[in-house]
């Protein structure tokens, strides 16, 4: 049995394919799934800095943007949680949102949640298929002490595990 599977998502096709390939290959019960989305602070900071150059009342606007981003992210994660219940065969799905560098937050959450497995796609949102692995996946593999299952997602798999 997989006690607790950690499934970080960037809402990419690669993340979806990783989950579907896992579903097809796995025949063991899953106790709980931890579903995480990390809002990349570097990207967010660049966006907000550009926004603040255009508008003078930036403090209030920036907080409103962050709140709206959190709300929208939670809506997307709640929809993904329903998919995860079916894919992983468990009703126990914990949703988390973090701000930070994706690979750092993935490593932190894996330890905080004491997960038994981290499920990662080989490539996420950027998906440079000419690279062997995406940069977030590589960094997680280097830094975590937890077991990691990397699913090749830029192949002909198509999400059906073949």
Image (spheres, grey):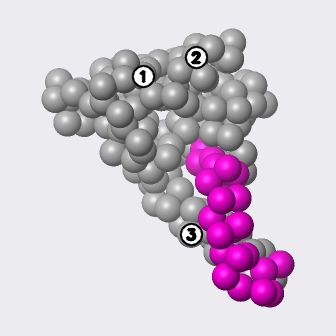
Taking depth in this image into account, of 123 and 24 the one nearest to the observer is 123
CA gap between label 1 and label 3 equals 29 Å
At mark 3, the secondary structure is helix
Residue 87 in view, yes or no: no
Residue numbers of the magenta segment = 36-59
Where in the figure is residue 159, as x and y percent of width and height?
Answer: 25, 36
Q: What secondary structure is the stretch in magenta mostly built from?
A: helix
The numbered mark, 1 or 2, whose residue comes first in the sequence reads: 1
Q: Is 60 left or right of 40, judged from the image as shown?
A: right
| Classed neighbour count for the residue bearing mark 1: other residues with Cα under 10 Å, few (<14), some (14–19), many (≥20) | many
**Residue 100 image label:** none
Q: Is 26 left or right of 117, judged from the image as shown?
A: left
Where in the figure is residue 119, as x and y percent of width and height?
Answer: 49, 27
Tag 1 near tag 2, CB within 8 Å: yes
Q: Residue at x 36, y 23 (%)?
A: 131
Does the stretch in magenta take in 110?
A: no
CA gap between label 3 and label 2 equals 29 Å
The quarter holding residue 53 reads: bottom right
The numbered mark, 1 or 3, whose residue comes first in the sequence reads: 3
Where in the figure is residue 10, as x and y percent of width and height?
Answer: 49, 46
**Residue 141 image label:** 2
Residue sticking out furthest to the right: 59
**Residue 133 image label:** 1
Query: What residue is shown with label 3?
Result: 72
């Amino acid at each position: 049995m997989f006690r607790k599977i950690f499934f970080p998502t960037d809402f990419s096709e690669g993340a979806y394919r990783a989950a579907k390939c896992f579903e097809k290959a796995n025949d063991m019960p899953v106790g709980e799934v931890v579903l995480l989305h990390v809002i990349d602070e570097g990207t967010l900071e660049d966006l907000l800095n550009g926004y603040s150059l255009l508008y003078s009342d930036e403090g209030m606007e920036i907080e409103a943007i962050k709140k709206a981003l959190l709300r929208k992210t939670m809506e997307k994660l709640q929809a993904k949680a329903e998919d995860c219940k079916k894919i992983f065969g468990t009703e126990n799905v914990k949703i988390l949102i973090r701000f930070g560098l994706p690979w750092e937050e993935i490593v932190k959450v894996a330890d905080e949640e004491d997960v038994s497995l981290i499920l990662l796609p080989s490539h996420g949102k950027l998906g440079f298929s000419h690279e062997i692995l995406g940069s977030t996946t590589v960094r997680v593999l280097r830094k975590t002490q937890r077991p990691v299952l990397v699913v090749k997602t830029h192949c002909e798999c198509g999400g059906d595990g073949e």
